[in-house]
Amino acid sequence: MTFTEKLNDILSARKSLLCVGLDAVMEKIPAPLRQSPEPLFQFNKAIIDATLPYAAAFKINTAFYEAWGLEGWRALEKTFAYLPAEVIKIADAKRGDIGNTSLSYSRALFTGLGADAVTVNPLMGTDSTAPFLQDPQRGVFFLCLTSNPGSQDFQHFSDGQVRLYEKIAVKVGEWNRHGNCGLVVGATHPAELQGLRSLAPDLPFLIPGIGAQGGDLENSVRFGLTAQGGGALFNSSRAILYASSGDDFAAAAAAEAKATRDALNRAKVS
Amino acid sequence: MTFTEKLNDILSARKSLLCVGLDAVMEKIPAPLRQSPEPLFQFNKAIIDATLPYAAAFKINTAFYEAWGLEGWRALEKTFAYLPAEVIKIADAKRGDIGNTSLSYSRALFTGLGADAVTVNPLMGTDSTAPFLQDPQRGVFFLCLTSNPGSQDFQHFSDGQVRLYEKIAVKVGEWNRHGNCGLVVGATHPAELQGLRSLAPDLPFLIPGIGAQGGDLENSVRFGLTAQGGGALFNSSRAILYASSGDDFAAAAAAEAKATRDALNRAKVS
C-alpha cells in the first residue's frame, strides 16, 4: 500500500480532514505544565489525548523542538513515539540538501523519529529529493505555494507560461513514481489552489493556514480535495493548541479541534 | 562589526580561504574511533585539531548528526563548543519556514549551537528569512545556485531576463541591510559564478563543491572573490575528512587541508 492510499484510507475511516499541528512554544504552555520535568512532551501528550478523536493526522514542526537542543530533540522523539498508528505522523522539517545529505535527513525523520511523511523544500531539485522517496509507504509533501506573505517573492516567478510553484507541481508529479508525493499549498491562496488541483488531480495536498493564519477554510476544501473527496489534510496549529491558556487548555483544544473538523466536513458536502 | 567584516578580517588574518566541512559519516570513521563512546565528536575533534592551522572556517552539516538522534545532537553541540573563536563556525542546516518558526530555528542554531553563520533556503521569501537576520554579527548564506545536478530543475528557471538564482541574488542584496547576508554558489558552475559576482560585488560567497564533488577550484577562486580579494569561503568536506581510512586519517586530513589551502592561495594570486 502506498502512502497516498494509506492517507486516503485514514481520511475515510476517521471521517476527518484535520491535521493538528504540534507547534509547542514554551512561553505559551500553561504554567503548571511548564514547571513539569518534560514540559514540551507533557503538553503534546495532553493535546494528543484531547484532540485524537477529531484528527486524521498530526504534524510536528521540528523547529520548535530544535530550539531547546537535546531536551527538545528528546521531546520530539517521545511525541512521535506517543502518537498511535491510526493517524498520519508528519515531520514538518522542510529539509533538502545534496543527495548523500538528504539520505541522512531521511534517516533522521523516517527511521529515527518514525514519521509517516515529511515536508521537503524542492529548490535543490531531483537528486536532492530522491533519497526521501525510496519507500512507497513514506510520504513527502513538497513546498509548492506556502501560506506566508513571502510566498510572493519567488514562488510566483513566471516565464510567461507557468509560475515557479506550478513548475514545482508538475515536477513533483514526475517524482511520484511510487505513489508517495504530495504538495504543501497554503489555504491563504484558494484561487491558486484550484489551479493546482487541475495540474495535479491526484496528489495529496497538505494545506496549512486555516487557523491562526486566517486562510479561507471553505474555499480551500472546495478546491483542495480530489474528485474522490479525499487527498487533502488541513492543518491548524496555534488556534487549537492555544485555544485557552488556562487549566482548561486541553478541553478547549478538543472543542476547537472538533469545531474545525466539523467545519471541514460541512465544507466538503456543501 | 558586521558578520561580513568579521569574515574578511579572518580570511586576511589566517591567510586562508578554506572551509572544512565536518560531514561525519559513521561508516567512514576509522574503526578504532568508531568504537569509542562518542565516535562523531571524537572524529571531529581529531579533524579540527589536525586541520585548524589551514582553515578559516568550519561548516557542520546538521543532517549527519540528526541521523543519529539524541547522540547525534549531542555531538553537534560538542563540536560547535570545541571550535575556537578564531574561525568562522557555520551551521549548514538549509532551514527556512514561516516567520515564527524561522525564529525558533535561528534560536536553535545561533543561540543553541553558537553558530556564527547558517545556511538558509530562501524559497519561502522575505518574512521567512528576516528572523535569521536580526543580529548583524551573525551571518546567513542563502542557497542561490547549488553544486548538485538538480540545481538545473528550478534554479535556472528564467523569465527571459533573469534566472531564479539571479533573482535570489538580487533579493539577498536587498535583505543585506545589516551587512550579514551571503550566497551559496557551487564551484561546479564557474561561469555563473562570474555573473553572480557582478550582480553581488560585495556579498560573501560560500562555495561548496571543490573537493569530492569535482568543482573547478581555479576558476571558482578567480571569479568568486570580491575585488578586494576576499568575501569567499571554499568548502571541502569528504576529500579532507576521508583522505585516509587508516590510523593516519588525521595526518592525511591535515596534508589535504594544507594542499587545498595552498591551491586556493595560488589561484588567488595567479
Image (cartoon, coloured by chain):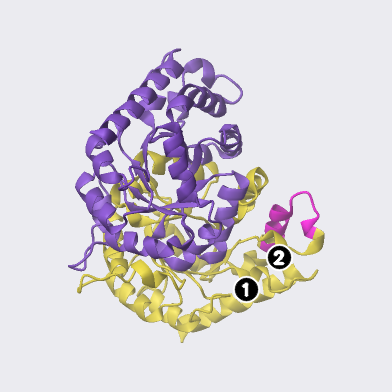
Chain colours: A yellow, B purple
Callout 1: helix, strand or loop? Answer: helix
Q: Classify residue B191 as left or right of residue A42.
A: left
Using the image, determine if residue A256 lies above or below residue B60.
Answer: below
Please provide percent x and percent y for residue A258: 63, 75
Residue A86 visible here? no
B115 or A7: nearer the eye?
B115
The subunit carrying tag 2 is: A
Q: Residue furthest top?
A: B247
Q: Classify residue A90 as left or right of residue A28.
A: left
B177 or A44: nearer the eye?
B177
Q: Residue furthest front?
A: B228
Three-letter amino acid code at the position of disc 1: Ala
Please provide percent x and percent y for residue A219: 44, 83
The verdict on residue A181 being magenta is no
A106 or B61: nearer the eye?
B61
The subunit carrying tag 1 is: A
Return the residue at label 1.
A239
Total residue callouts: 2
Label 2 – label 1 distance at C-alpha: 12 Å
Image: magenta residue range:
A33-47
Q: Residues within 10 Å of mark 2 (few under 14, many from 20)?
A: few
Disc 2 versus disc 1: nearer the observer: 2
Three-letter amino acid code at the position of disc 2: Lys
Please provide percent x and percent y for residue A206: 45, 66
Return the residue at label 2.
A28
**Residue B266 lies in what quarter of the image?**
top left
**Residue B75 lies in what quarter of the image?**
top right
Q: Classify residue B187 as left or right of residue A233.
A: left
SS majority, magenta: helix
